[in-house]
Image (cartoon, helix red, strand yellow):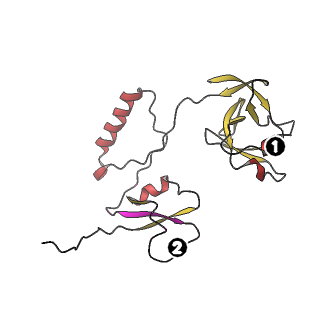
Amino acid sequence: MNTEKITARRLTSEEVSDLGPQEEIFVSAELDDISLDCYAPAHLAKPGKYFEGGSFTARTVFGKEIQVLPNNAEERGIWIADEAGEEIEVLQSAGVLLNLALFVPNGNVEALEALYGAAREAFGAGIVQRWNEEVVAVPDVKVDLFEEPARGRKGTGGQNRDRRALDIYPTRVRFMEASAGWKFIVEPHHEVIDDTPTI
């Protein structure tokens, strides 16, 4: 386990209430319901000023959401880097886990194996692993993916959905997240035909 000792101090609920989501904090390290004897870098899920007597929600850099009551003596609380504080151990990242949706034309298994082989050669044979493999047939149809305000469409002019427009295959939508306050709209793709008269 790769950890780093840093100097930090524990915050009270009042101090956490003054923090925003952009400020780095440290909370108890938990991975897949396993509590580790160290801390993890994190950020508040929403500004601390919205604390209303319940627990604060922190999201670690490893994607784990943790509910914390800073003033609870039985919990490890929320910490922030401070040279006047005490030493704590912070869990370090060992790398980045990529969730990839790979499209292999005509379902060519040899091409997929060649792709894995190239990745192993680039990063090391024991590094690249297959965590979850799902084979999904992709229809030979393109769709258009738009983002629209989540409150619904306003008119049919399309002026509210020009922020993001992509030619995309339907299965890839499952691996994407819409922008805050927006939702995805998937429509059949229509080729743009230019019928401007030419000389």
In the rendered image, the vertical position of residue 28 relative to residue 126, given as above or below: below
Whether residue 146 is in magenta: the answer is yes
Residue at 84% over, 51% down? 53
Q: Could you tell me which quadrant the N terminus lies in?
A: top right
Please state which of residues 132 and 21 is positioned toward the viewer in this rendering. Answer: 21
Q: Give left or right: position of 102 versus 31.
A: left
Which label sits on residue 82? Answer: none
Q: Main secondary structure of the magenta part?
A: loop
Number of numbered tags placed on the structure image:
2
Residue 56 locus on image (x, y percent): 76, 47
Identify the residue position indicated by label 1 in the image: 69
The mark nearer the N terminus, 2 or 1, is 1
Identify the residue position indicated by label 2 in the image: 153
Boundaries of the magenta span: 136-160
Q: Residues within 10 Å of mark 2 (few under 14, many from 20)?
A: few
Residue 76 locus on image (x, y percent): 79, 34
Residue 153 locus on image (x, y percent): 52, 73
Q: Based on the displayed image, in which of its 4 quarters is residue 157 positioned? A: bottom left
Whether residue 95 is in magenta: the answer is no
Residue 163 locus on image (x, y percent): 46, 61
Query: Whole-Å distance between the Cαs marked 2 and 1?
Result: 41 Å
